[in-house]
């Protein structure tokens, strides 16, 4: 495992195990920003093809790997206060990941204040508080404004934001966990961009964690077309120029073309797997397990698992 700067201003590092592939990308300058179209920062992706399965051993492994990645990013004294925000609409299953994770968190800020003899930082228990602020359609208030107000009152040292994402590939739905220290733009994946949540907007460092739970219709059509092209090419005579030409189409241009064709008929249509209830429950258990381990270094996974039931 080594860090390589294949793109100017971008350092990439990959680590593989039988179940998990971890990709770490660090964008270090403006050249890297332009190359990847993302702000400077540290981006980690855990790819777990079997994450959709209800495998307790895999859940524990992924939670522990997630915790190690978060510890690297957080790097704060154990007495530092962390505020965890579960973004999303708890009434809409694919968008309820954030609130579900918050439900399973070990929140301790009040315990350290009122029961210091039992709960204290010397035992590796950090002051953690959590909030699921809902969405604009429920509260009538910009979610970013709610978070900013809470931050000004609580004054945490770090904010961790959990959100459901929109995938740009069918195979990534509920199989990848994405982490970044550059903040998050709620709703941007489904054409509903809201006020950004970042260090610049709320005044404290922000770590974002997201898992794709939906995919838009254009992506479904694009992925289906790719599979058809591959199958047609396989069945065609060797050297067929037509299918070679189809395969050379730029992926982004093809996606945008399909999107423009579909939009008049389906608008901003997004789809999700029929077993999304089970996927959200399993994913929220995995994320909260990793968060509890990362935020409370004095607690074992066995102790953490009691909060995941």
Image (cartoon, rainbow, N blue to C red):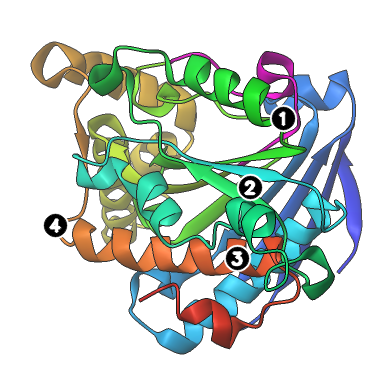
Which label lies toward us, 2 or 3?
3
**Residue 279 position (above or below residue 223):** below
Residue 244 in sight here: yes
Tell me the residue that label 4 is attached to: 274
Contact check, label 4 and label 2, Cβ < 8 Å: no
* Residue 77 placement, left or right of 179: right
The 10 Å Cα crowd at callout 2, few under 14, some 14 to 19, many 20 or more, is many
User: According to the image, label 1 marks what residue?
Assistant: 155
Tag 3 or tag 2, which sits nearer the N-term? 2
Residue wearing tag 2: 179
Crowd class of label 1 (few under 14; some 14 to 19; many from 20; radius 10 Å): some
- Earlier residue among tags 4 and 1: 1
Closest to the observer: 191 or 150? 150
Q: Which sits earlier in the primary sequence, circle 1 or circle 3?
A: 1
Q: Which marked residue is nearer to the observer: mark 1 or mark 3?
A: 1
Q: Position of residue 212 (x, y in %)?
A: 41, 47
- Give the Cα separation between the discs numbered 4 and 2: 26 Å
Tell me which corner region of the image, top left, top right, bottom left or bottom right, holds residue 114.
Answer: bottom right
Answer left or right for 106 relative to 204.
Answer: left
- Viewer-proximal residue among 16 and 195: 195
Classed neighbour count for the residue bearing mark 4: other residues with Cα under 10 Å, few (<14), some (14–19), many (≥20): few
What residue is rendered at 68% in x and 73% in y?
Answer: 118
Residue 271: image location, x then y, percent:
20, 41
Rendering coords of residue 63 (x, y %):
57, 72
Is residue 197 inside the magenta stretch?
yes
SS at mark 3 in the image: helix
Magenta region: which residues? 194-208
User: How much space separates mark 1 and mark 2, taking CA atoms?
Assistant: 23 Å
- How far apart, in angstroms, are the residues tagged by discs 2 and 3? 16 Å
Q: In this view, does 252 lie above or below 68?
A: above
Q: Which mark is residue 292?
A: 3
């Amino acid at each position: 495992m080594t860090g390589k700067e294949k793109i100017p201003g971008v350092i990439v590092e990959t680590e593989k195990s039988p179940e998990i592939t971890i990709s770490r990308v660090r964008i270090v300058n403006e050249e890297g920003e332009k190359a990847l179209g993302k702000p400077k920062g540290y981006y980690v992706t855990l790819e777990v093809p079997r994450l959709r399965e209800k495998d307790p051993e895999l859940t524990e492994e992924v939670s522990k790997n997630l915790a190690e990645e978060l510890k690297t990013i957080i790097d704060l004294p154990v007495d530092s206060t962390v505020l965890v925000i579960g973004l999303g609409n708890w009434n809409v299953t694919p968008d309820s990941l954030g609130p579900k994770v918050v439900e399973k968190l070990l929140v301790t800020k009040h315990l350290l204040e009122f029961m210091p003899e039992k709960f204290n930082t010397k035992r590796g228990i950090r002051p953690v508080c959590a909030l699921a602020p809902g969405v604009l359609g429920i509260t009538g208030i910009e979610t970013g404004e709610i978070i900013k107000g809470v931050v000004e009152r609580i004054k945490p040292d770090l904010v961790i934001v959990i959100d459901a994402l929109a995938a740009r590939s069918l195979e990534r739905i509920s199989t990848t966990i994405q982490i970044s220290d550059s903040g998050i733009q709620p709703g941007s994946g489904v054409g509903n961009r809201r006020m950004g949540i970042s260090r610049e907007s709320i005044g404290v460092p922000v770590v974002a964690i997201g898992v794709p739970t939906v995919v838009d219709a254009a992506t479904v059509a694009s992925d289906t077309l790719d599979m058809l092209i591959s199958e047609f090419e396989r069945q065609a005579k060797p050297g067929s120029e037509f299918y070679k030409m189809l395969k050379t189409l730029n992926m982004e241009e093809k996606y945008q073309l399909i999107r423009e064709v579909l939009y008049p008929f389906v608008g901003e249509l997004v789809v999700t797997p029929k077993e999304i209830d089970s996927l959200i429950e399993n994913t929220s258990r995995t994320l909260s397990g990793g968060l509890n381990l990362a935020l409370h270094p004095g607690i074992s996974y066995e102790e953490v698992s009691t909060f995941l039931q």
